[in-house]
Image: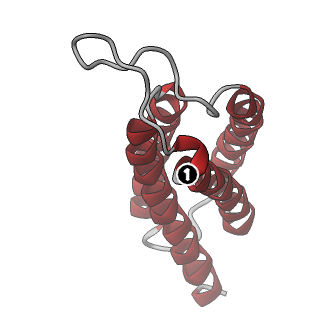
Amino acid sequence: MYQRLQQKLQKIQDFVQRDLDGLTGESYAGSPKQDGRGFAVGADPGRGEGLVQSSQELVQVLVEVKQLWGELQAQPPSHSRWQSLCTEMHKQLRLAEIDVQFWVAARQSGTALRRGQQLCDRLSTLIGYCDAGIKLNQQNR
């Protein structure tokens, strides 16, 4: 079960990383238009249509992650550290959902970069927790 969850999390992380790579590319080299107060006007070029289509895919993968997470929590504890691992994973998954919302809503490339990196870091933490769960399950066999 941890393996399937880990694969889904990796898929999300790969998606986010592709977008971050695009943000650091040439299409984002220009500064966004600003109003007289220095606030960005409109979204950055290049973050429009492709991200919307891809973010729909991202939402679908998040739904799959939630389903897998529900199945994992429904299983009987497989090791003594199961409860603490589940607590941490649950917390990080909830924070990752919020990170995704903020990342998708980012209108400036700098903001999107920061939020995307934060999301990638959180996903790396979750993937590490899955590794820990896999190892603990193997030790208990």
Q: Report the number of numbered marks.
A: 1
Q: Tell me what residue is drawn at x 40 percent, y 51 percent.
A: 118
Q: Tell me what residue is drawn at x 57 percent, y 75 percent.
A: 131
In the rendered image, the quadrant that contains the C terminus is bottom right
Element at badge 1?
helix
In the rendered view, does 135 fall on the left or right side of 30?
Answer: right
The image position of residue 70, as x and y in percent, is: 65, 43
Q: Tell me what residue is drawn at x 58 percent, y 83 percent.
A: 135
Decide if residue 86 is in sight here.
no
The image position of residue 12, as x and y in percent, is: 66, 51
In the rendered view, does 123 fall on the left or right side of 59?
Answer: left
The image position of residue 102, as x and y in percent, is: 45, 30
Is residue 127 shown above or below 43? below
Within 10 Å of disc 1 (Cα), the crowding (few <14, some 14-19, many 20+) is: some
Foreground pick, 113 / 100: 113
The image position of residue 67, as x and y in percent, is: 71, 41
In the rendered image, the quadrant that contains the N terminus is bottom right
Q: Name the residue under label 1.
A: 20
In the rendered view, does 49 fall on the left or right side of 112?
Answer: right
Decide if residue 23 is in sight here.
yes
Q: Tell me what residue is drawn at x 56 percent, y 63 percent.
A: 77
Foreground pick, 76 / 50: 50
Is residue 8 shown above or below 45? below
Is residue 66 shown above or below 79? above
Foreground pick, 29 / 136: 29
Going by the numbered disc 1, the residue's amino acid type is Leu
The colour style of the image is: secondary structure
